[in-house]
Amino acid sequence: MDVKFTIRDLSLASEGRRKIDWVIPRMQVLNKVREEFEKEQPFAGKKVVICLHLEAKTAYLAQVIKAGGAEVTVVASNPLSTQDDVVAALVASGIGAHAWYNASDEEYNAHLQLALDTEPDFIIDDGGDLVSTIHTTRPELLKNVKGGAEETTTGVLRLHSMARDGVLKFPMIAVNDAQCKFLFDNRYGTGQSVWDGIMRTTNLVVAGKTAVVAGYGWCGKGVALRAKGLGAKVIICEINPIKANEALMDGFDVMPMAEAAKYGDFFITVTGNMNVINKEHFHLMKSGAIMCNAGHFDVEVNVAQLKEIAVSERAARTNITEYALPNGHLLYVLAEGRLVNLAAGDGHPAEVMDMTFALQALSLEYVALNYDKLSPQVYQVNTEIDERVAMIKLQSLGLSIDKLTKEQEAYLGSWSAEA
C-alpha cells in the first residue's frame, strides 16, 4: 500500500467499512456530488488534507473528494472523536491518515504536521487548526495552499480574526455560515447528537429535570429545542440581548450563569468561548449536576479550576468524571469537557451531515476552479451552491416546490406598482 499513514490498527478496517457502508445510502446529496466528481475530476492531480472529526460521515466525504481525482489525507480535529476502525477503513481504501483515538497533545500536533508534509493544494478545516498550523509553524507551505473551506463557527471566527489582522494568506470558504449548514446541521444536527451523547453516556432521564444551555446561537437553539422535547425545563444563558429576548419568546427562562448554576441538572455550553462555567459556578451547583460542552474546543467548562477545588476525582462511568467538592457535593463532567456529541457519541445524523459535507465538497470545488481569482480573505458559500444542495436534498426525498412565473419575477423585480 503506497499511502502514508500513522494509525493504531489496520486490522480494524472491516468494522470501519461497515460503518461507512451504513451512512452512504443515507447521504443522497453527497452521492449526487460524487457522481459529478467522478465525471469531471475537479481535483485531478491535486492534494487535499481534510481535518475533521474522523467518523463514518467524514470518511465518506474523504472518499468523495478522492473520487474527484484528489490525493487525500485525513487528520483528526479532536482527539476524542476519532474512530480508529473508520480511519483504518480509509487507509485500506487508499486514503492517507494520521490519527488515533485519545491522542495526547503532542501526538495530535505531530499528526497535523505529518498530514501537512503532503504539501496540500487545498484543505478542509474544522476549528482552524490546519490554517493556524500552516501560518505559524509551516509557512513554507503557503506557496502551495491555494485555499480551502472551514466547517465550524470557532474556525470561522479565527479566520475572520486573521483576515482582519491581514495575516490570512489564502482564500477560505466559511461553510459554517451557509444556510444549509446553520439551519440544519447546527440546529437539528447538534440538537439531536448532543442529547444522544448525553443520554447514552449517563443513561439518565431528561424529563422533569432542568437543562441549562449556555449560548442561543443556532447550535444552542437546537440543544434547547430537543431538551424541551425530552421534557426538561430549559434555562438559557446569553450575553446578547437580542438572542436572550428570542429565547424568552421561544418559551425558555433566561438568566445569568451565576443564577442558573443553582438550578441546573444538566449544563451544556455552546458558545465557542472560554470559561463559560468556572469556579464561581461550581460552588453554586447542586450535588449530581452534570456538565458537558458542545463547542469546538474544550475551554468552555473550566475543568482545570474544577480539579483545583475538588478534594477527589474518579471515573464514574466511561466518559464521565466525578469531582467531589469540599462541601460534599459531587459534580460530573462528560468527555473531559470536549465535544460531547462526538467524544461520547457518533456525531450528527447522516442525513444532516449529507447536506453539510455536500457544501464542503462543492465549496472546495469552487475554490479549485476559481482560486486564481480569489484574494486571501474569508468568503461566504456561493448562494447557488447553498440552494442547489437544498434542492438536491428535496429531490432525494421525492419532493418538489413551486417556481415563480415570469409575471411574478417581473413583479418582484420592479419598484413600480403598475408593473
Image (tube, rainbow, N blue to C red):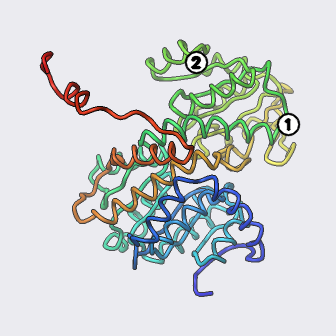
Callout 2 amino acid = Pro
Viewer-proximal residue among 169 and 228: 228
**The label number, if any, that marks residue 203 in the structure image:** 1
What element does badge 1 sit on?
Answer: loop
Mark 1 neighbour class, 10 Å CA radius: few under 14, some 14 to 19, many 20 or more: few
Callout 1 amino acid = Asn
Q: Residue 177: which quarter of the image?
A: top left
- Residue drawn where x is 63% and y is 50% of the image: 350
- Residue drawn where x is 66% and y is 58% of the image: 55
In front of the other: label 1 or label 2? Answer: 1
Mark before the other along the chain sequence, 1 or 2 = 1
Vertical position of residue 412 compared to residue 93: above or below = above
- Residue drawn where x is 42% and y is 60% of the image: 131
The x and y percentages for residue 320 are: 80, 43
The x and y percentages for residue 122 are: 40, 67
Vertical position of residue 306 compared to residue 413: above or below = below
What element does badge 2 sit on?
Answer: loop
Q: In the displayed structure, does residue 20 sit left or right of residue 44? A: right
Badge count: 2
Of the 4 image quadrants, the one containing the C terminus is top left
Of the 4 image quadrants, the one containing the N terminus is bottom right
Task: Please give the residue where the numbered disc 2 appears in the rendered image.
Answer: 256
